[in-house]
Amino acid sequence: MTKNQSSPQPNTRDRILSISQTLFNARGERVVTTNHIAAELGISPGNLYYHFRNKSDIIAELYLRHQAHVLALLTPPSDRAFTMVDKAALLEQLADALWHCRFFYRDTEHILSESATLAELHKRTFDTVFEKTLQLHQALATAGLIKASPQEQRDLSYNAWIILTNWISFLRTTLQVDIGDDNNQALIRRGVYQVLALEKAFMTPTALAQLGNLADSYYVALDQPKPSTPDAH
């Protein structure tokens, strides 16, 4: 790149989306307003409204981008057999994608109650995700890596999605983890461990050999020591 050349700068619309996602993830979608977003960007609210009519439109666009990313991940390699190492890597990438859109999984019910259109889109997204996840389990069965009936494959497909999409809420509500803090992203890996632990009962010796100690690498301790309370005097 010459001195006279520079990297293309993101346009205002992309900057609005980027800053909105950062603020939503850090503070929670409910408390962030379009005025907060505009102030963070150093633009007027009117400039923001030129690109998005309201906050719901921003959320919908962020969701569409997230949806495209997730669906792209749920595609097995076309030039070779699907392996347990592939499956673990896919789960890790999926967990990472969920973390980067964690505001949605923190307040899913509230967000969907605010937009019937987004609620319907989310339902269709799940339907597609379920079919793709089922295809992955079928690929594992065909490769002799899991021994599971068609119904058990459907159950595994449901359970994997339930665990991963509710893991952020579990961290926040049950373990009281500050999910707005990027330093806590490592805890999302435990969700990958939980899915693999669930599926181990269906894995064949070949699958277990492929997986090796990989599942344990996703283990993160959840029982953090609580600070001691000073004795009252």
Image: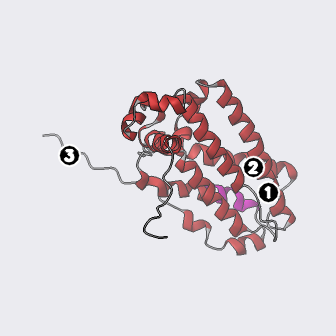
Q: Earlier in the sequence, mark 2 or mark 1?
A: 1
**Residue 57 in view, yes or no:** yes
Give the percent coordinates (x, y) of residue 211.
68, 71
| Residue 200 part of the magenta-drawn span | yes
Residue hosting label 3: 230
Q: Which residue is mark 2?
A: 157
Disc 2 secondary structure class: helix
Secondary structure of the residue carrying numbered label 1: helix
Quickly name the residue at label 1. 137
Is the residue under label 1 in contact with that under label 2 (CB below 8 Å)? yes
Q: Residues within 10 Å of mark 2 (few under 14, many from 20)?
A: many
Q: Quadrant of residue 136?
A: bottom right
User: How many residues crowd around disc 3 within 10 Å: few (fewer than 14), some, or many (20 or more)?
Assistant: few
Q: Which residues are magenta?
A: 194-202
What amino acid type should be assigned to the residue bearing mark 1?
Answer: His
Q: CA distance from mark 3 to mark 1?
A: 52 Å
Q: Residues within 10 Å of mark 1 (few under 14, many from 20)?
A: many
* Residue at image location 54% in from the left, 57% down from the top: 190
Q: Is residue 81 left or right of residue 13?
A: right
Name the chief secondary structure element in magenta.
helix
Looking at the picture, how far across and down is residue 194, in whole percent?
61, 55
Q: Amino acid at mark 3?
A: Pro
SS under mark 3 = loop
Closer to the eye: label 2 or 3: 2
Q: Residue lying furthest left in this view?
A: 233
